[in-house]
Amino acid sequence: MFSRVSPEQKLQIIEGLRHGGRVVAMAGDGANDAAAIRIADVGIGMAARGSTSARSAADLVFTEPDISLVLDALVEGRAMWQRVRDAVAVLVGGNVGEVAFTLMGTALAGRAPISTRQFLLVNMFTDLLPSMAIALAPTPTDPQDRRALLAGGQPSMGRELLHDIGARGAVTAAGALLAWQIGRIAPFRRRASTIALAALVGAELGQTLLLAQQSHLKLLHDFGEALEEA
């Protein structure tokens, strides 16, 4: 913690943090904060008397002199980023599973396991509904969940995301292929494609329903790890 530092020392602190690989936000409401606000990754100007210089140099301007608004903005931003990450996993993973199921089914039967119209129906249910559910998901209001978002860092868009996409695709393809193979056994052979369609939709929507619970548990796990490290 630092207190009673000069404008030059503020610049040195920000440069030191950035040199260490940190993303730095600087909030201030006076002319002596303007230079530090300008060089920070995120400059925040606080509304106050004589804060014109700080607000002019800032990327964001708070209309109320309440520093706790920074935490609210971080929670909202990380919740939105989590929704983007979940949407990518849901949509790309589901499509990977559909393609894999089609290729394996065609290799086994010599023709596509479901028709083009059925594929359109699958996409309508497994792309539109999950996307709406994820996009309309509310930002957590529970204090513990909000602290977990702050402590857990940004959701991974790298190897962890690729793992989730692969797992979702594998479960979707395996479930649909198993259902379709069972459907090919008499007396259900004429309904095999309908059974496969229902299995595709059910597998993808079921995983989407589990996603929210898994995200909540991961937040709590990350929060616990952050507390242990502290």
Image (cartoon, rainbow, N blue to C red):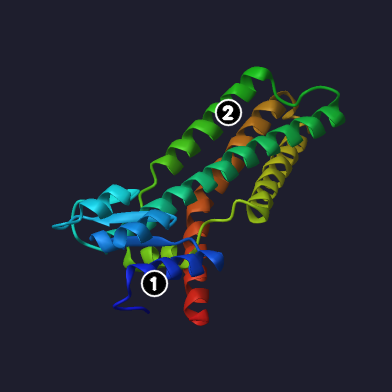
Q: Quadrant of the N terminus?
A: bottom left
Q: Quadrant of residue 48?
A: bottom left
Q: Which residue is mark 1?
A: 9
Q: Which mark is residue 134?
A: none
Q: Secondary structure at mark 1?
A: helix
Q: Which residue is mark 2?
A: 123
Crowd rating for badge 2 (residues with CA inside 10 Å; few <14, some 14–19, many 20+): some
**Residue 26 pos. (x, y %):** 36, 61
Q: Quadrant of residue 159?
A: bottom right
Q: Are marks 2 and 1 in contact (CB under 8 Å)?
A: no
- Between 154 and 48, the one lying in front of the other is 48
Residue 140 visible in the snapshot: no
Crowd rating for badge 1 (residues with CA inside 10 Å; few <14, some 14–19, many 20+): few
- Between 141 and 124, the one lying in front of the other is 141
Q: Please give the name of the residue rendered at 45% of the width and 43% of the height, measured from the top-left corner.
A: 134
Q: Secondary structure at mark 2?
A: helix
Q: Please give the name of the residue rendered at 47% of the width and 78% of the height, measured from the top-left corner.
A: 227
Relative vertical location of residue 103 with respect to residue 78 in this rendering, above or below: above
Instruction: Give the left or right position of residue 165, taking residue 56 as reference.
Output: right
Q: Amino acid at mark 1?
A: Gln
- Between 15 and 42, the one lying in front of the other is 15
